[in-house]
């Protein structure tokens, strides 16, 4: 009897997944045909309907469409349509709304390549905003970035660091405490960190430990960089920072 129940549950799950895909065929077609404006307009309609407002898929398509627009912004007239301004920021914002509705993470897992590409582009944009002293811009982007990758502690640490440097120390320090606590608790993954996690963590451990040291908290600075050495023993940048802090 238990096997029959489990089979029925599995069948219903597969049936639901296919139904969801069929429901959003119009969005899929518009996106794959590079009709991003049409895809966004149609997806927004679903987000405004009571029946589909909680589905993650429309937010995914909006995010993906804005992300593609960010790669070629001159193709879209932001003067005539202000909603097309700052497409990368909008892509990340809708990715954060997707995360809120994608409770089990399955939609994001099915679209891992997109999520990774968006992650790297956002990290580049935040760093560029910091270097260009566009504080309000990179702080706002950092907040949405953390929400979009809500269970990614490497991203949380990266965004926390930039919130600190963007004069949002209170929130930034909270992000740092939560991320370092969980990174320490979880330890180094058996398969190691992926390329983007290594990048986010290396930059974060170096800059955060330097921030702490500059603010006369050498003990915590050393604890932070020691955690970095434990998680990323192969990082020359972290080893170099550890020596500099001695």
Image (cartoon, rainbow, N blue to C red):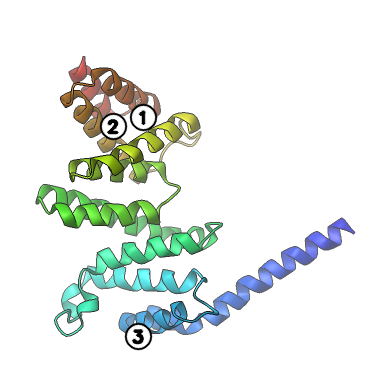
Residue contact between numbered discs 1 and 3, judged by CB atoms under 8 Å:
no
Q: Is residue 216 above or below residue 51?
A: above
Given this view, does label 1 or label 3 mark the residue nearer the observer? 3
Residue at image position (51%, 80%) is 24
Q: Residues within 10 Å of mark 2 (few under 14, many from 20)?
A: many
Identify the element where label 2 is drawn.
helix
Q: Is residue 185 above or below residue 67?
A: above
Q: Please give left or right for residue 140 compared with residue 32 in the image.
A: left
Q: Is residue 99 above or below residue 154?
A: below
Residue lying furthest top:
246
Q: Residues within 10 Å of mark 3 (few under 14, many from 20)?
A: some
Whole-percent x, y for residue 34 in the image: 33, 80
Residue at image position (38%, 81%) is 39
Q: Please give left or right for residue 5 compared with residue 116 in the image.
A: right
Check residue 38 in the rendering and tell me which mark sits there, or answer none.
Answer: 3
Q: On the image, which quarter does residue 231 sit in?
A: top left
Alpha-carbon span between mark 1 and mark 3: 44 Å
Return the residue nearer the eye: 122 or 140. 140
Q: Which residue is mark 1?
A: 232
Q: Please give left or right for residue 20 compared with residue 243 in the image.
A: right
Identify the element where label 1 is drawn.
loop
Return the residue nearer the eye: 12 or 102. 102
Return the residue nearer the eye: 120 or 42. 42
Q: Which residue is mark 2?
A: 205
Identify the element where label 3 is drawn.
helix
Could you tell which of marks 2 and 3 lies nearer the N-terminus? 3
Q: On the image, which quarter does residue 78 sit in?
A: bottom left
Residue lying furthest right:
1
Q: Residues within 10 Å of mark 1 (few under 14, many from 20)?
A: many
Given this view, does label 2 or label 1 mark the residue nearer the observer? 2
Residue at image position (33%, 83%) is 35
């Amino acid at each position: 009897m238990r096997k029959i129940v489990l089979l029925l549950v599995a069948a219903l799950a597969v049936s639901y997944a296919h139904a969801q895909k069929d429901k959003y065929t119009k969005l899929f077609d518009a996106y794959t045909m590079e009709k991003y404006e049409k895809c966004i307009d149609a997806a927004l309609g679903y987000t405004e309907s009571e029946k589909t407002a909680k589905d993650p898929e429309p937010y995914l398509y909006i995010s993906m469409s804005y992300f593609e627009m960010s790669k070629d912004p001159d193709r879209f007239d932001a003067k005539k349509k202000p909603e097309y301004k700052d497409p990368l920021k909008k892509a990340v914002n809708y990715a954060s709304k997707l995360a809120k509705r994608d409770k089990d993470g399955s939609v994001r897992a099915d679209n891992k390549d997109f999520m990774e590409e968006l992650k790297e582009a956002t990290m580049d944009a935040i760093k560029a905003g910091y270097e260009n002293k566009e504080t309000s811009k990179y702080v706002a982007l950092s907040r949405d970035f953390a929400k979009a990758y809500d269970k990614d502690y490497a991203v949380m640490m990266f965004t926390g660091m930039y919130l600190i440097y963007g004069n949002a120390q209170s929130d930034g320090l909270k992000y740092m405490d939560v991320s370092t606590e969980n990174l320490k608790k979880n330890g180094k993954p058996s398969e190691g960190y992926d390329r983007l996690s290594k990048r986010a963590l290396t930059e974060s451990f170096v800059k955060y430990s330097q921030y702490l040291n500059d603010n006369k908290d050498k003990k915590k600075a050393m604890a932070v960089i020691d955690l970095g050495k434990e998680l990323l023993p192969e990082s020359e940048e972290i080893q170099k920072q550890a020596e500099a802090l001695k």
